[in-house]
Image (spheres, rainbow, N blue to C red):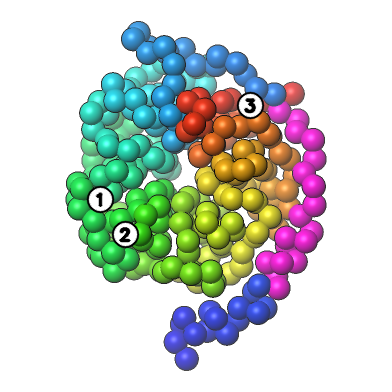
Amino acid sequence: MTRKDRFFSRWPVLAAVGLALHAIAGPAADTHYRAVENWAQFPSGVTRWGSATGVDVDRHDNVYVFQRNEAMPIMVFDRNGKFLRGWGKNMFKTTHFLRVDRSGNVWVTDRGDMQAFEFSPQGKLQMTLGKKGVTGGNESKDAFNGMADVAIEANGNILIADGEGPNTRIARFTRRGKFIQWWGGKGTGPGQFDVPHSIALDSKGRIYVADRSNNRIQIFDPTGRFLTQWTNFGTPWGLFIKGDRIYVVDGTANNCLLIANIKDGMILEKIEGLNNATAVTVDSRGAIYVGEVNGNNVKKFVRQ
């Protein structure tokens, strides 16, 4: 029996687990967060946000924003909203996600040119994955066709959610960008995807994928072996994990942020009133930042 066959032979049990988790995830509690208006101080020449597709924080709680603004697509602010620096002019075709790794390096994805980039915290380009404007299928080792999100494992390996397009896979590369493996493929079964749009890792190295058009979050062990799924998060667009919480933006019909227990997917809180939210992050003090595409905004929420 192949590895794939073993996955599907376990599917009835795994599906039952997923449905059970869905059943126990009852209504979310009333939110204990309030919005912080006008939290960011824009640099000279910038008066408003562009379509904000990516947001993350570093270990100093500096806030990195990736937006569809050709003049300054990457902007960095301190925790008080003071502008620090920006870069990336005319570098990207269609900005998408942004992630800051454990070393403070900044990773961004360009869905238009099908590339991922690694920058130093100061904006120096350090690595590029993919070839500008060149596409490749699920089997490709050096090209993409659905570049969406990126996550960096504890050992430095790079995970790419290559799924907002024809491709339907998670691809893994070494720290130096050498292809290791991929998994997925089009479908609704365990380990298959229909728009794997966002990816996040927990403290044990488990891999969480926002399988957007399948309206579920799939969970894999560090080797890529399917574990279970959660179907109680609407249409998940973006994921972020901090401690024992997973933060999920439902950016389609529900337009909300869901905060859940990472152990069982039980929804604990819900922040409503978002506008096509795509990305979410949380700093060391618990402040939440949400990037909105159609809202042209980066919203900040703090506990009240």
Instruction: Kindly tell me whether residue 185 is visible in this rendering.
Output: yes
Q: Amino acid at mark 2?
A: Phe
**Mark closer to the chain start, 2 or 1:** 1
30 is within the stretch colored magenta: yes
For label 1, the crowd category at 10 Å Cα-Cα, with few meaning under 14, some 14 to 19 and many 20 or more, is many
Work out whether residue 267 or residue 61 is closer to the camera in this orientation and state it. 267
**In the rendered structure, are the residues bearing label 2 and label 1 in contact, judged by CB atoms less than 8 Å apart?**
yes
- Report which residue position mark 2 lands on: 173
Residue farthest toward the top in the current orientation of the protein: 44
Work out whether residue 28 or residue 159 is closer to the camera in this orientation and state it. 28
Q: Is residue 83 above or below residue 117?
A: above
In magenta, the rendered stretch is: 16-33
Q: Quadrant of the C terminus?
A: top right
Residue 98: image location, x then y, percent? 40, 39
Mark 3–mark 1 distance (CA, rounded to whole Å)? 33 Å
Work out whether residue 88 or residue 82 is closer to the camera in this orientation and state it. 88
Q: Residue at x 37, y 13 (%)?
A: 46
Please identify the quarter of the rendering in which residue 121 is found. Answer: top left
Residue 211: image location, x then y, percent? 52, 57
Dot 1 lies on which element? strand
- Report which residue position mark 3 lands on: 301
- Report which residue position mark 1 lands on: 129
